[in-house]
Image: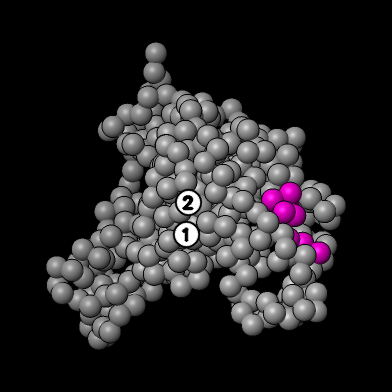
Amino acid sequence: MSQRIERVEFEGGLGAKLAGRLELPSGKPRAFALFAHCFTCSKDVFAASRIASRLCAQGIAVLRFDFTGLGQSDGDFANTDFSSNVGDLVRAANFLRDKYEAPKILIGHSLGGAAVLAAAGDVPEATAVATIGAPADAAHVADNFGAHVETIEADGEAEVELAGRTFRIRKSFLDDIRSQEITPRIAQLKKALIVFHAPRDATVGIENAEKIFVSARHPKSFVSLDDADHLLTQRTDAAYVADVLSAWATRYLGEAPEDNKPIVRADPDRVTVVETRNGKFQNQVLAGRHMLTADEPENVGGMDTGPTPYQFLNAALGTCTAMTMRLYAERKAIPMERVIVRVGHDRIHIDDCEECAATDGDTKGQVDVLQREIEIRGDLDDAQRKKLMEIADKCPVHRTLENKMVIRTSQKT
């Protein structure tokens, strides 16, 4: 499902202007989710970006934002604490409620997970909460300060290096995280909970996940992230969290909006295209059990919510080419690691088309040309590469496009 991004701003818990990024699917979102990033991270940290994009592709709009004093948000980080983070989250939920729709899903990574557990009670519309590598209590974050804790206690503040950056941590921050009681809030959650945690997480131990899970009431779930690291830097780990999370949350979101359902019944033997009446050009494309969106760019009156018709045509040739070459490479044991096909469409004067000289038909006017570029990766010799390029021209869609075609149109009564 195609998506669009809106940059938003709203006032945080301490009055600073916070910068947010709202990812919206085409059509009406299935639900809105609010994502809280890890301690001293930003909304653009890889895990947050990847998970938000994946959820959006499945019809769930996601707002991620920078906490006060971080990323592109205003304010002084030194003046913040865990309570102000919770306040920022509540303000973010209020913003969604006022401008769009209240979040039904709250997602928190690392200390952001502890924050969403603390803030959940102030977001009554939320029906599902997810934590990723979250500590069971806010005071756990002090472990990152090491020997600086004594300096902070004695001098009132200290410069602490975290993830390659220097932050000023004040005693008021320590006092705040030590005063937080999150376990009772988990017990009173009254929302579905899923806990994601890696057993080998070297930053927040797996015992934190156990404490969160045991403290919560049903419905609750636990998902082990195997050998993932704390920040989910591996693309596959972040994608896995998003896929499991979206499938799990569906149970607690109610019926999908009509915009995300097929408008007409799909025909198993044909591709069905139906206008959505959303914008000027948007169409729903049903291909078997798959639902896609077609549209036109904004500069020609569309909403740019999906590929254009010609892009679908280019995709047909490109995918067929790649599949045909893969089948041949495997059959002949050719060590092709990957094939990349790029296809563009152009319309040129027939006099400029060398390939058209030997063809029958009109010799005047313009002709459509599909420009196909093929990149073959792997340790192949010249003969193998040459043969694969020959095979590319034998893909069924290529042959169909070069044949004289007949399009029979009928009107359904």
Is residue 69 left or right of 3 when viewed as pictured?
right
Q: Quadrant of residue 126?
A: top right
Is residue 64 left or right of 345 when viewed as pictured?
right
Q: Residues within 10 Å of mark 2 (few under 14, many from 20)?
A: many
* Tag 2 residue: 212
**Between residues 51 and 74, which one lies in front from this camera angle?**
74
- Residue 396's place in the image compared with 405, above or below, is below
* Tag 1 residue: 208
Mark 2 secondary-structure assignment = helix
- Residue 316's place in the image compared with 381, above or below, is above
Q: Position of residue 57 (x, y in %)?
A: 50, 47
Mark 2 belongs to which amino acid?
A: Ile
Write the start and end of the magenta stretch as one range: 79-88
Taking the image as drawn, is residue 303 in sight?
A: yes
Residue at the (56%, 54%) spot, across then down? 113
Is residue 90 left or right of 237 when viewed as pictured?
right
Is residue 98 left or right of 383 when viewed as pictured?
right
Answer whether labels 2 and 1 touch (C-beta < 8 Å): yes
